[in-house]
Every structure is written in structure tokens, then in C-alpha cells.
Image: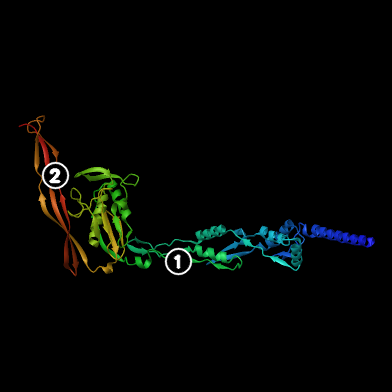
Amino acid sequence: MRGKIVLAISVALLVIAMGLGMGFYVFKNILDTDFIYRGVKIDGYDLGNKTVEQALEYLRDKKEAKLEGKHMDLLYDDWIYELELRDLDFTYDYAKALGEAFGVGREGSYIHRIRTIRRARKGVNISLKSYYNVDKINEIVSHIAKEINRNPLDAHIYISDGEIVISDEELGIRVLEDELTLKISDNIYLLEDISIPVENLKTRLTKAYLSRINGVIGEYSTSFKGSSNSRIENISLSAQAISNYLVLPGEEFSYNNTTGPRSIESGYKEANVIIGGELTPGLGGGVCQTSTTMYNALLLSDLTILERHPHSIPASYVPYGQDAAVAYGYLDLKFRNDFDFPILTYAELVGDKLNIYVYGDKDARDYGVKITAQIVEVIRPDTEILFDMSLEPNERVDIQKGRIGYRVVTYKSILKDGEEMSKELITKDHYRKRNHIYKIGPE
């Protein structure tokens, strides 16, 4: 009996020992290992019996090699931009996928782990996620836009040898950056060709629109014969500034803003200017002849005058009441284009004459304009006598020469088929008299 008990105990101990040995073997060789279990794959690549480091190197070699040369073509006309995935910092989340692969069979109780490991041998595939740098797409799209974008180019009009020349307009191009960015993002895994989305930008001024300017609607000439070279240079400089100047419907024109400050830096010379009723040397002498000539051309074109000033003394090169004095920052000549078509001002010096033209739609003008100035009052100067005891008896010394004053009204008449349809008073000017003053000695 005792022998049977001893045998039973021995068998039990043997079974326990074998169980412990088997458990130790399973733990040491299966559960306690640094290798990914058999059957575990990432994107179809078998990583069983590999350490995480070995699996990473193996997986990178396979996946990165397949990225070489992968690209999409971005197309616009004859322009091709080859965008490689590498340019977008395209890569894979190896760490996350390998973490999942290594974690297979390593969670739960020993029995649960063993079951999971056995099931894994039949195949467990883990998806390898990819990602790219969105900021890189934005940078590339911005670069493409800078290369393709083109501002629209307006048609241009100018006068050459008396002929109207109008250039063609050019449409602008703008890349639709947001749309292109979305197309690239959606094409990362397709890698198909992409037509770069663009929109045409219309010009503000077309040749057809500027073609409404088809002839002269008003012109005027004045003579600068006898002027100094400096004065002629100032007339020429100011005439160039207003020449080939386009004014669209509703736009206003300022003579001072267009011709600029009368300064040495601007190229103006010293010549006689009228200050306080006297001819005095000053920068820009002569620009008032340009403004006056332009003023009369504007009147004959029937444009809306917004600002105009007479001189303190009548100008010699136009009828009284038809001059236009300017002084930078003080007196200006302004007008507005109230027509439904654009106009172009043009000035030229021919011989000793300044000619200014206003071009517009002559077909829209079925009438003419006549300007008439009328002197309504002649104001004779008085004579002032000052006695000076320091002078010789009856000796006379002139202090100030007298000048006749005038009151002038100017009318604008609209003529049609030779008949006056309307007559409008446009200005009332007063050129002030100046008394004659002289000294005389005692009798």
C-alpha cells in the first residue's frame, strides 16, 4: 500500500515537473522573445521572426524603393510641371505599424497570448499608413502660380504722326490655387495627369472700347513767338505731360497733378511769370500758356470744366476772358469727362505754335461749339501824384506805370447746322486796373 502511494506521488511530481518545464519552455521560447511572431505582415510583407529594427530596415528598403520616380504631371498649355511624391515629403508611419505588428500576441493572459500567436500563423496583415506635408503642396502651388500668373494688359492708345494708334489688349491668367491644391491632394494615390485650373482675367480697356476714339472733337492753338528759350522749354515740358493722356468717362483731370511741381528737379527752367500783376522771373514760366491753350481746346470739346482761374492781367496770346492761370498747389485747371466715351488729349509744338487736340468719338458729335468773349467794361487807371521835395523843381519820376482794367464775360454757344441752338454764360472775369503813380519836385 505504501509503495502505491509513493508511486502516485512520484508520478504527480513528474507531471508537475514536466508541466513546469513545458511552461518554462513556452515562456522562454515563445512568450519571452524580441521577434515579431510568424504570420504577421505589414502591407503584405512578412515580418515574422524579425526584430523591430530588422523589420524596419526590411520594410523601408521595400517601400522606399517603390517611391522612386513616382510623380504626377501638372499641365497647362505647353507647360509641364513634374511633381514627385518626394517633393511632398511623402513617407510612411513605420513606427505605428511596427508597434502594432510587434504587439500581436503580447496582450492578455498566457493562454490568450498563445491562442493569438497560433491564429497569427494563418496570417495577420497590418496596414501601413502614409502621410505627406500639406505645406509643401501649398508652397509648390504658390510657385506654379507665380510662373503662370499674368496680369491683364490693357489696350493702349496714342497719337503718332497725326494718326490714332491702338494696340490690342492681352487677357491675364490666374491659377486657381485652392482648386489646384485640392486636385493634388486627391491625386496622391492615383498619380494621374492634372490640368492646372486657371481663369482668364479680363482687361479694363479693350481695343474695341478705345476705338470709340476716332477723331478730333476740339482743338486750339496759341503762338509763343518771341518767347525765351527757357519759356519755350517749359511750354514743351508741360505739353509733353498732358500729351496722349487718356480720360475715361466720369474721370477727372487735374493739370497740376499731371504736369507736376514746377521745380528744377522736374526739369523746369526760370522764365517770366505773372505775380501780383507783374512779370517776374520764376520757375515754370510758360506753363500757363499750355494750360490756357488746353482750356480753350476743352471748351471747344464741350467738356465739363471744374476749375479755372483768370490771370491778374490779360494774357497776350488769347482773347480776354479765355485764359487759364495755374500755380502748383494754388490755382489749377480741372475738368471731368461727362461723355459716354473716353477722350485723349494730345499736344505738340510746331514751329512757334502750341497745338492741343482733344480726341473722342466725333461721330457722336452732331453739333459744334463756339466761344465768344465780350469786354463789358473798360476801367481807366487813375493818376496818383506824389510831391517829393528832394527832387529838382518840376522834376518827374515814374513810380508805377498805369494799366487799364477790364470786365469780361465769356459765352459758349452750341451750333447745329449753322444755327445757334443755345448760348451759355460760362465766366465773368475782372482784370483789375493799376493806377499810374509818379513823383514830382517842387514848383
Element marked by disc 2: loop
- Between residue 315 and residue 343, name the one nearer to us: 343
Q: Residue at x 69, y 59 (%)?
A: 99
Q: Is residue 117 left or right of residue 10?
A: left
Q: Quadrant of the N terminus?
A: bottom right
Q: How is the image coloured?
A: rainbow
Q: Quadrant of the C terminus?
A: top left
Element marked by disc 1: strand
Q: How many marks?
A: 2
* Picture quadrant where residue 425 is located: bottom left
Q: Is residue 189 left or right of residue 291?
A: right
Task: Give amino acid for label 2.
Answer: Arg
**Between marks 1 and 2, how big is the CA–CA gap?**
66 Å
Q: Is residue 371 left or right of residue 5?
A: left
User: Which mark is in front, 1 or 2?
Assistant: 1
- Between residue 170 and residue 399, name the one nearer to us: 170
Q: Earlier in the sequence, mark 1 or mark 2?
A: 1
The answer to whether marks 1 and 2 mark residues whose Cβ atoms lie closer than 8 Å is no
- Between residue 140 and residue 333, name the one nearer to us: 140
Q: Which mark is drawn over residue 288? A: none
* Picture quadrant where residue 392 is located: top left
User: Label 2, on which residue?
Assistant: 434
Q: Which mark is drawn over residue 200? A: 1
